[in-house]
Image (spheres, rainbow, N blue to C red):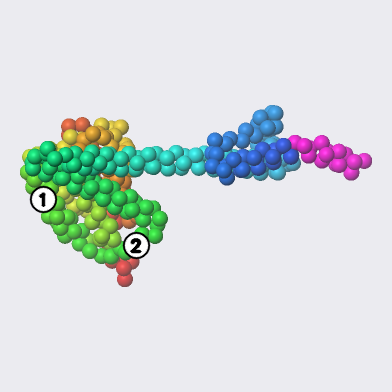
Amino acid sequence: MLLLIGILAFIHGTPHRIRLWTTVFGALNRIAKGDYNVTIDIESMQGRKPSRRFRRGGKGGGQRNDFIQLTETINDMAAGLKRIERMRQEFVSNVSHEIQSPLTSIGGFARALRSGSLTDEERERYLSIIETETGRLSKLSDNLLKLTSLDSERHPFEPKRYRLDKQLRRVVLACEPQWDAKRLEMDVELQPTEIAADEDLMSQVWTNVLHNAIKFTPEGGTIRVRVGSGQGEAVVAVTDTGVGMAEEDRLHAFERFYKADKSRNRSAGGSGLGLAIAKKIVDMHGGAIRLDSKPGEGTTVTVALPFWDRQASG
């Protein structure tokens, strides 16, 4: 009698089990084909809310509880893949937009140069614009390759001991043509500071941060560069007297391709990748980067990096 009851219970439950697994396999098949708009509603599949024993995996509910965990995992996976796909589409759209703008300028002025009625001054101006836009494309390509390499986690990473203050001084001097052209005052105070980091990568960070400060500081403004020490870390702060940014823009400042003022960034030659690259590199070093800004009150970018550990280095 007990055997007969067991067989009847199994037969009665089989169609329900088949329906559940068919739904799961169907969802996985849709995900495999690139459709991430998948949500398995376990309650509607059962036609009722799971009992307390079912939810907690009590006696007799272990297998069903495992099934709920499986469906929740699938739902989470689909949601994560959907989010990644949306980011990928936005990335492609942004890259396409950034490429299209200089290409349009290059094509338009190249056609204009075919005209025989141009003056020497106009011809020189058009050629200068084409050269500038070509440089923008080249810089965009370099930045995209840099981000791809950093994201792959196979980018060369060779931390070593060096003087951070000396590196910052070299970067400031290398940017002299840019800040001198805008008659900016450079207020530099660099305490002797030693860290362990990849010197080439960190040079990229300081260059990107300083270029941003120069770009958005009006003529005759001031840029302050400070390096000091905090609790077990070196702290670098770059402050400008530029236009600043609103709180909403500040929160997105390190996102790729984000521009608080697209028209102003475009005229200045920016692509919205400089701070994203800086953050990626700082994260690789176990440091932190922060941006503080208010409209009309300038911007401060602060980078904190671990000191060189003399004991750990032997």
Residue drawn where x is 15% and y is 45% of the image = 128
Position of 190 with respect to 80 (left or right) is left
From the viewer's side, name the closer residue of 137 and 78: 137
Residue 72: image location, x then y, percent: 59, 40
Residue 113 seen anywhere in this rendered image of the structure: yes
Q: Is residue 243 above or below residue 232?
A: above
Position of 256 with respect to 1 (left or right) is left
Q: How many marks?
A: 2
Residue 124, magenta (yes or no): no
Name the mark on residue 58. Answer: none
Position of 194 with respect to 36 (left or right) is left
- What secondary structure predominates along the stretch shown in magenta? helix
Residue 165 seen anywhere in this rendered image of the structure: no
Name the mark on residue 156. Answer: 2
Question: Hey, which quadrant is residue 95 in on the image?
Answer: top left
Question: Where does the magenta region start and end?
Answer: 1-16
